[in-house]
Amino acid sequence: MKLLLFITTAVISALSFSPLLAQDDAGLNAALGLQRRVQNVFEDNKLAVVKVISAFNTENEDAKNVLLVGTGFYISKEGHIMTNTNVVYGADRIWIEREGIAYVCEAVGHDPLTNISIIQALTLPSDFEFLRFSEKPDLPAVGSFLLSITCELGMQPGPSFGLISGWNTQYVERILPTIYLRTDIPYDGGEGGAPVFDLNGSLVGMIVAALPEIRSSLVLPARAIQRVRDDILFSGQVTYAYFGFQTRQTSSLASGPWVEVEDVQKDSPADTAGILKGDILKQVGDFEIKTDDDLRTASFFTRPDEFVTIYIIRGDKEMNLEMKPSVREVPITAMPPAHAQAPMEADGPFPVGADFVLPTETAPPAEEKATSEEDSLPDEAAPAQSASPKDKDAPVASPQVEKAPSDTGEES
């Protein structure tokens, strides 16, 4: 918001003082060029972004159903859509809405750790588009411009502009499973699940969490999204690697930071591979290890049941060990309950703005999956609500993840 105010002020200043106009031509042209770029990225990608709506039946037959609203985007020509877990998990009915028409969806799979779910539309608009991922996307630098296309407060998709404020693997006391992008794109409700682009139009991530204290958001980077996507499309769930050791980050003026093994669980993958207490981790697979953050990211991208090379220093010797991680169990308590984000029955003012309306028509269902309009939309529903960003849109992390940084290795 501050960035947009600065740019707007600069443009107005350039137009207001005609004697200085020649001097300000470069700045004005740059601002107008930035504006055109934002408009182009939005126009190029808007047909891939949809409003996601989920309905939750209430136990009381006399009560109205509860609706939640978020953002999603197509990731395949088959109609797979990425959105937030805390919008659709446990819903009795899910659909997307576009230009007043509802397209019925079904859940494909969920990952509560990253707050990512994939749903699939059973019928598709004729002109929809899907977003493509880069082969190995790099993390954009801090200070980079970003553009998100969101269904803010349940409205139609629109652009939201901001900056990358930092890279985070921890926010306050919450330990994140990998590097997240902290952005100043606001998250006031409905933005969860929105795609985020750089000014070249490349997909750099997806909004997964709100930081209401600073009116900002956390974005899961594109590479991490791909890792989650592949697992969900393959099996409907995401599996993470378990190494079986505890580590401690240490540093010195001479050598800088390093990560040392403090303990090895008996009969764990690390124990079987021959890792010992006191070993210094230098690399896990393709990831160089200097800090706990590095190890946490390496753990996130390592696949269970696939051998990975661990480079260590033991005393004055460098060694390569082959380890086959097992599957880390994520307790069921990490999964948000069906109504984790569901508001109470709405009797008060409409919470998402007058621009939000229920779909006026349901798209014809696919023949092989015939679904009546009555089955796709609730008969009676409380006004749709944007998923609350304050305490429910933070990444849903398991107890294994939310430990002190020094314990990261044990839970990797």
Image: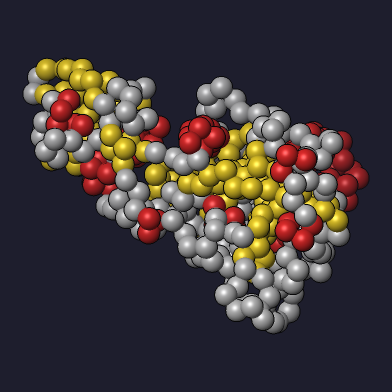
For residue 87, what is the image quadrant?
A: bottom right
For residue 313, what is the image quadrant?
A: top left
Instruction: Tell me how the rendering is colored.
Output: secondary structure
View extreme (right): residue: 18
**Residue at (19, 31) in percent of width and height:** 270
Residue 379 screen position, x and y as percent: 76, 68
**Residue at (57, 51) in percent of width and height:** 84
Q: Is residue 401 above or below residue 126?
A: below
Q: Quadrant of the C terminus?
A: top left
Residue 131 screen position, x and y as percent: 68, 33
Q: Nearer the viewer, residue 234 or 372?
A: 372
Q: Nearer the viewer, residue 377 or 279?
A: 377
Q: Is residue 9 above or below residue 213?
A: above
**Residue at (32, 45) in percent of width and height:** 329
**Residue at (82, 59) in percent of width and height:** 359
How many badges with numbers are in the image? 0
Q: Quadrant of the N terminus?
A: bottom right
Q: Can residue 277 be seen at all in this image of the molecule?
A: yes
Q: Is residue 99 above or below residue 264?
A: below
Q: Can residue 73 be seen at all in this image of the molecule?
A: no
Please state if 299 lies on the left or on the right of 317 as rendered.
right
Please state if 351 lies on the left or on the right of 342 as rendered.
right
Residue 256 screen position, x and y as percent: 25, 33
